[in-house]
Amino acid sequence: MAVDVLERRAVISGIGQSQVGRRLGRSDLDLTVEAALAAIADAGLTRDDIDGLATYPGGAMGGGPFAGPTTPDVQDTLRLRLNWHDGGGEGPGQIRAVFAACLAVAAGLARHVLVYRTVTESTAQGSGGRVGIGQAMGAAGAGRGVPRFGGSFQWMLPFGAVSAGNWLALVARRRMHEFGLTRHQLAWIALNGRANAARNPKAVYRQPMTMEDYLSVRMVSTPLCLYDCDAPCDGSTAVVVSHRDYAADAPSPACHVNAIGTALRGRPSWDQFDDMTTMAARDAAASMWGRTDLRPHDVDTADLYDGFSILTMVWLEELGFCEKGESGAFVEGGKNIALDGPLPLNTSGGQLSGGRLHGFGLLHEACLQLRGQGGERQIAKRPEVAVVANGGGPIAGSMLLTAGRG
């Protein structure tokens, strides 16, 4: 391409992941250090080599169990000497911290950036059910009278729409109305994830799932059932983003960043987006494809955000793997997205069965597949191009990774 695509100056030189599971009872800092040290060692580096640090979201946004430790906490614990650091919740999806690291490396602000994402939501949940945003905000204001909500929350939370599950159910229902999407078709995102999770020793749910299991489980927010929602867990994922001239020295095959998608051209709203069948995935995908000569048919594996199954369906269309409104037919029967299919999807089990690592687990899996280190779930013909997509509600981001070339 004629334009200088700055993110191509970056590679992912190291990956690491902590123990992953339900109610581990370990602190977020403990899990982060485990993942971070693993990623640094995997990159063939030491802590002294790390001169950049980034996370999403940082600053305890959304509460400690959701946010994980801040960059100052991790910098101090690992005794890092940093030239650049970043943390924040606003931006193109959960992997915005990886995007920021790529651009920092490209600009010469740092050479090796440690990026991490940590959640301890399962331990925080305890033995009770999942806590919605409204409940969490109400608890935060306990003892101070009736809580007051600003922005769009004032029009949703008081009326019982307290969770992204409620808000994205509107997207699913709209797609059923416009395109004829059925629950039997939607089920294949969950069924495929569970089949792949059976090959992943870290996955939260590995037991077999049938169509009958899916259809008979309790409804959460019509038409989304329990198996359409990701599984809260504890765990940390870390990657090292390095300048591409380090790729030859990295002990493991580096994953080259080919393009990132960061655009947001519609209203950043859960219920007022200009097209409720697409949301922010539309713009992130379009901007990514505008920064590369690669095309959807070049992609060998896809790790697409499945915080809720309907988001994965949207990404399949917006990334161009099928036509608008045809994702239901594309996934039906599971053959197209199976491990041995033309587009292996969420090969670790995704977040529906692998566990809610908030998108970073998908990035970790894409790197494993590009390296040929997927173990029992490794795609038979080692992938050369992978796409990773995060978010898909009012914010979203996507990236293309390649094996051995930028």
Image: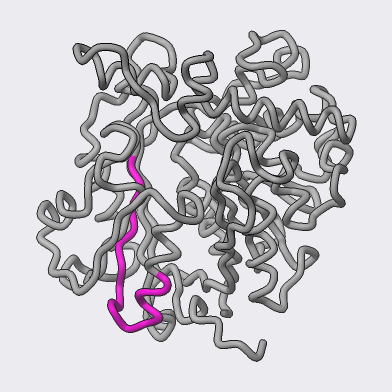
- Marker count (numbered): 0
Picture quadrant where residue 259 is located: bottom right
Give the colouring mode of the picture: one colour
Vertical arrangement, residue 405 with respect to residue 235, above or below: below
Q: Residue at x 72, y 39 (%)?
A: 276
Residue 137 % position (x, y): 34, 23
Residue at (59% x, 64% y) in the render = 261
232 to 295, vertically: above or below: above
Asked whether residue 46 is in view, the answer is yes
Counting from the top left corner in percent of width and height, residue 379 is at 67, 53
Asked whether, in this view, residue 140 is left or right of residue 66, the answer is: left
Q: Work out whether residue 194 or residue 81 is closer to the camera in this orientation and state it.
A: 81
| 329 relative to 136, above or below | below
The quadrant the N terminus occupies is bottom right
Residue 181 in picture, x, y percent from top left: 85, 30
Any magenta on residue 107? yes
Q: Is residue 115 left or right of residue 298?
A: left
What are the residue bounds of the magenta stretch? 102-118
Residue 202 can be seen, yes or no:
no
Observer-nearest of 359 and 271: 271
- Residue name at image x 40 percent, y 81 percent: 106
Residue 41, placed above or below residue 406: above
Is 279 magenta? The answer is no
Q: On the rendered image, what quadrant is the C terminus found in?
A: bottom right
User: Picture quarter containing residue 168?
Assistant: top right
Residue at position x 48%, y 71% in the image: 253
Indicate the position of residue 52 as horizontal and vertical percent values. 26, 68
